[in-house]
Image (tube, coloured by chain):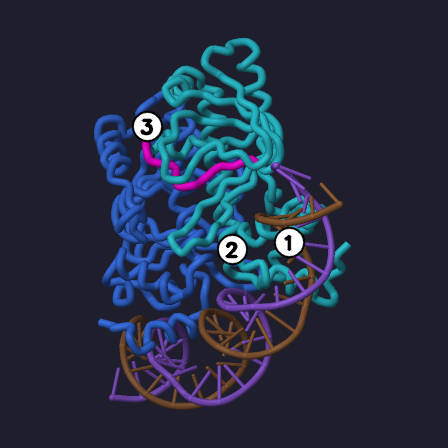
Chain colours: A blue, B cyan, C brown, D purple
Amino acid sequence: MSRYEKMIRINKELLRYITETEKTRPDHILRECYGPKEEIIAQGKNVFSVYIVKKGMIKCYLTEENGKDFIQEFFGEGELFGEIEVLNGTLSFCAVETVTEAEVYKIPKERFMELQREDVAFNLLIMKALARKVHYKALRHSHNQLYAIEDNILRLKKQFPRLLETIPKRDIANYLGITLRSLNRVITKPGAEDH
Amino acid sequence: MSRYEKMIRINKELLRYITETEKTRPDHILRECYGPKEEIIAQGKNVFSVYIVKKGMIKCYLTEENGKDFIQEFFGEGELFGEIEVLNGTLSFCAVETVTEAEVYKIPKERFMELQREDVAFNLLIMKALARKVHYKALRHSHNQLYAIEDNILRLKKQFPRLLETIPKRDIANYLGITLRSLNRVITKPGAEDH
DNA sequence: CTCATATCGGGACAAATGTCCTTTTTTGTG
DNA sequence: CACAAAAAAGGACATTTGTCCCGATATGAG
């Protein structure tokens, strides 16, 4: 693992905290359930709430003007989303869509901002979550850019051995910012023990 | 410009705030001056303070195990650094080094965390700064990955017309995660009016 | 001024990656 | 089951990008 975070992002601390908070002070903390492949946030639209994943896997991706998709992150338990747009008052620059069935906590933005001011512990958790995202993105971009596709795939498989059986190839390719063809070539390549 | 942020990051709001704060409540807000090409933070070391750029241009880059460098950001006036490591309690994953002469505000980490709790306005500014970084990195990574080198350079030149005369070629290449040779090829290429 | 050192520019070739297509397999739905 | 649609696999070729050079041109220290 070394210094790298797992491919599918999780945040146990935040999950624990929000679970607790929802039990003891459930004011305005909602819950929503989704089936697979449902869109939670659309690209280019207003974002009215901040979300924390309770269960399931969710992907966050953006479609470029040339039609290509790029997956920014896979969100797992405890991961946060929607906070960027709420904090900066911008439209969503990504689409957020479930991969598996999923359940999320949903906090309306006004309530979220209120919580930031009132609840110091929550505030710190959110700050840390943001800092982790920056850190993660920095390392990921650097790697993707500075190593060949093969190295990047090997790295992913080390972080997440069941990668190829769990996540559709197209998503993996979009996560790496490469074509499906290139992904297949590298996977099939002699020496790359599939399994 | 459209939805893209400038290449050299600035944060006027934060600069204004810290300037004001330093005047009226200068407790533990220090100032430091650097010449060009001085290292402010070393990769892999402890970070003891959070910094805000007062003046000058600073680069933030990381050296991969294969010896290649990747520039994460160019910091201009008001930009924040060191906060990731302080918040997460990790070692620096980047080196931070002045490009031009520069002056920075320096806040010891204990004082920074204290300010987070005490000063709601400052806290919100930092949260927003973090959210901006995530946003910026997301768009940048997506572009770099999904477009050809030529498009990426054109985009940079649109954001920052004096790019090629201001920043050394090697730095531009490291910022794009490409080789110097590839950069030169694209710049020289017929049709790419240099100027 | 002079030498050592960065920076710059580019030729020639190799390797990596993308594009375009076709085929097969799997999956989901009536 | 039958069919349409999605996912997977991969051939053939074009293009992009990297590697390894070498020479020219600044730039800075003594």
Report if residue A33 is visible in the image: no
Q: What stretch of residues is rendered in magenta?
A: B89-98
Image disc number at residue B177:
2
Secondary structure under tag 3 reads: helix
Q: Residue at x 29, y 57 (%)?
A: A100
Q: Residues within 10 Å of mark 2 (few under 14, many from 20)?
A: many
Q: Nearer the viewer, residue B42 or B106?
A: B42
Residue B168 place in picture, x, y as percent: 63, 48
* Magenta stretch, overall SS: loop
Q: CA distance from mark 3 to mark 1?
A: 39 Å
Q: Nearer the viewer, residue A92 or B3?
A: B3
> Where is the C terminus of chain B found, in terms of image quarters?
bottom right
Image disc number at residue B155:
1
Q: Nearer the viewer, residue D8 or B83?
A: B83
**Label 3 chain ID:** A
Question: At label 1, which amino acid type do we have?
Answer: Arg
- Let me know if marks 2 and 3 both belong to one chain: no
Secondary structure under tag 2 reads: loop
**Label 1 chain ID:** B
- Let me know if marks 1 and 2 both belong to one chain: yes
* Residue A155 higher or lower than B88, as above or below: below
* Residue A114 higher or lower than A163, as above or below: above
Q: Residue at x 26, y 67 (%)?
A: A165
Image disc number at residue A122:
3
